Image (cartoon, helix red, strand yellow):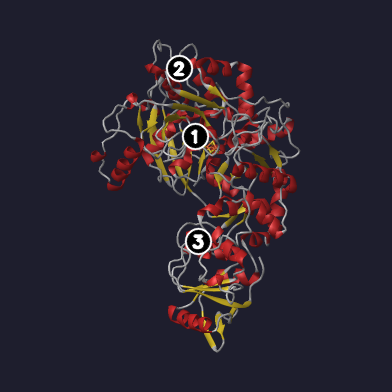
Amino acid sequence: MGTTLAEKLWASHLVRKGEDGAPDLIYIDLHMCHEVTSPQAFEGLRLAGRPVRRPDLTIATEDHNTPTLDIDLPIADTTSRTQIDTLRANAKEFGVRIHSLGDADQGVVHVVGPQLGLTMPGMTVVCGDSHTSTHGAFGALAFGIGTSEVEHVLATQTLPLKPFKTMAINVDGELPEGTSAKDIILAVIAKIGTGGGQGYVLEYRGDAIRNLSMEARMTICNMSIEAGARAGLIAPDQTTFDYVEGRPHAPEGADWDDAVEYWKTLVTDEDAVFDAEVNLAAADLEPFVTWGTNPGQGLPLSAAVPNPDEIADADQREAAVNALKYMGLEPGTPLREIRIDTVFLGSCTNGRIEDLRAAAEIIQGRTKADGLRMLVVPGSARVRLQAEAEGIDQIFKDFGAEWRNAGCSMCLGMNPDQLAPQERSASTSNRNFEGRQGKGGRTHLVSPLVAAATAVRGTLSSPADLEGADVLVGAPA
Amino acid sequence: MEKFTTHTGIGVPLRRSNVDTDQIIPAVYLKRVTKTGFDDALFAAWRGDESFILNQPAYSAGSVLVAGPDFGTGSSREHAVWALKDYGFKVVIASRFADIFRGNSGKQGLLAAVVSQENIELLWKLIETEPGKQITVSLEDRTVTCGELTVPFEIDDYVRWRLMEGLDDIGLTLQNEEDITAFEQTRASWRPKTLPAKTEPKVEIEAARPVS
Ligand code: SF4
């Protein structure tokens, strides 16, 4: 019997097989750090007198706490400033490479790794952050870890782990116009639930996935964690190789040929068996939005806010009742009629250049809805520079959107970019939990295309709802 | 982690059950960036009360906490263990511990010893009638001794072995350092390294300003 891609990645990183129920020891190829989950880990090393085993496989950047305005001034919030200063001091003391605010390679850690060419097929990638699953889009085994594990990786470059189970998510057929990767993953989560992936590595397969760009694949893998999965995976192919080639850390010359030859072997064997399988027809998809307070509470945009009374499962019914109360929504309201105060375009889910391009294409020449605020936060400083070189920033500014510096920003509201109580957002980020974007804030998760159309109309909308939308944008994001 | 074989220190009676992690260390202390210096945070809400046991001079230098059942329930914060250790506790004795707390203790070298409630009552009596009385905990013999009284305690074999060897998870992994080094030698040379750093050309970043 053949093996799955996840199993191949596991086997190729096995330092030592666990005996008598002990965990396996797995080698880690790339460890990324940020300011929030690393301080106690470095402190632990210091207390034990241990060095970082492989500073050359470690990289740090500042993202969660950083302001997106006035980045040349000292950070006003003292807790945030302390965390950033601590990261800088730790990086210096332990010899870890860091990209700080004001550096072209600063940004959300999951945008920075791929753009530098540090994320490649066949690797193991970890970070003290659950959305590390993003890097699985390259055919790498990538997952989030806790602070004790961060310390463990810093000290040993390995982790003791029990093998994950495998699940295939087959998305066949062609995506309809106006839909994108975000709609695929929101539909997957709505189908299997926020706990459906627990303990699994999800491997996304099928034509609809193969036809996606690298950045769109990252969007999908990014949100695997919202289905409870340990990691997401997509087998590498020519699209992957083309994306990696020529990036700063990509192999060159003969090394490149060796690498590609190896990467081509990173597929699930035809006769391999997954522990579970889920099928989805891409052709049936529509733009998807969430109405509730977890990413599994989503529906096609053409639907209405659900009536909890019609939900059979008691737990889900109660969750829906609570969600609607928090979200301030009435059952039966068409989703298209929900009025939005703030549109947030950014995050490690949808803050890459293709996302900005797709949204800009829709708003260009149109006017922003009255009273609506739109925040555009590139995923990294490099993405911002690229957009500025293409003139995309001007399109957003002319439209009346706020053009910001890179970081996590309103994805989690740890910096000043927050929703006010009861303020309602359409957000391209990944979590619509209560209070995630600011205390009392109400979040609807959407794709960049829906975010842009919503900014024009002021209610949740898809590009097809816009006047003169007969020619629809190609939707790579 | 230091090797733990036996420890002798002042016993502190904490006659409360269900001491949860919020009581051990309130959430406001979790914003810190350090792993030490939590001694002031330990039982912060109770420390303001003069009659609280750790405010009594005879007990303030205690290192063996004798608590009521279900110690350490609530959130998974490792800070609870850090705070106890920082204050100077080496051992917590109770008839029942919350699982996560017990797991965290083992990782951090704090001995969580399970003693029957009957014997806890006897220990309480001894250290209350004679404040400052010492307790000896032998991990080797799995016993708690206070004056004439010696009672047994329970602990997971694997955790006991790790504590006696002074091995935390990292220490354990590093026992296999040869395997790690051998593995590293098999890695293809084209696998990416973060150092020396490579990036695209440096660019000046202009700070965005508030949009008026
Ligand atoms: S952008 Fe959001 S999800 Fe991504 S790393 Fe930052 S806070 Fe986490």
Q: Amino acid at mark 3?
A: Ala
Q: Residues within 10 Å of mark 2 (few under 14, many from 20)?
A: many
> What chain does mark 2 sit on?
A
Q: Nearer the viewer, mark 1 or mark 2?
A: 1
Amino acid on which disc 2 is placed: Lys
- Residue A418, numbered circle: 1
- Secondary structure at badge 3 equals helix
Report the residue at 62% width, 19% height from top: A388
- Residue A368's disc is 2
Whether the residue under disc 1 has CB within 8 Å of ligand 1:
no
- Left or right: residue A443 versus residue B108 is left
Query: Closer to us: mark 3 or mark 1?
Result: 3
Between A450 and B20, the one nearer to me in the picture = B20
**Label 1 amino acid?**
Gln
Tell which subunit mark 1 falls on. Answer: A
Which circle marks residue B61 in the picture?
A: none
Q: Secondary structure at mark 1?
A: loop
Q: Is residue B150 left or right of residue B34?
A: left
**SS at mark 2 in the image:** loop
Q: In the picture, residue B61 is in which quadrant?
A: bottom right
Q: Are marks 3 and 1 in contact (CB under 8 Å)?
A: no
What x and y, as percent, mark residue B7? 62, 77
Whether residue A125 appears in this view of the structure is no
Residue A79 is left or right of residue B175, and the answer is left
**Of callouts 1 and 2, the N-terminal one:** 2
Q: For this rendering, which residue is in front, B102 or B25? A: B25
Mark 1 neighbour class, 10 Å CA radius: few under 14, some 14 to 19, many 20 or more: some
Q: Hey, which residue is sitting farthest left in the picture?
A: A309
Residue B45 disc label? 3
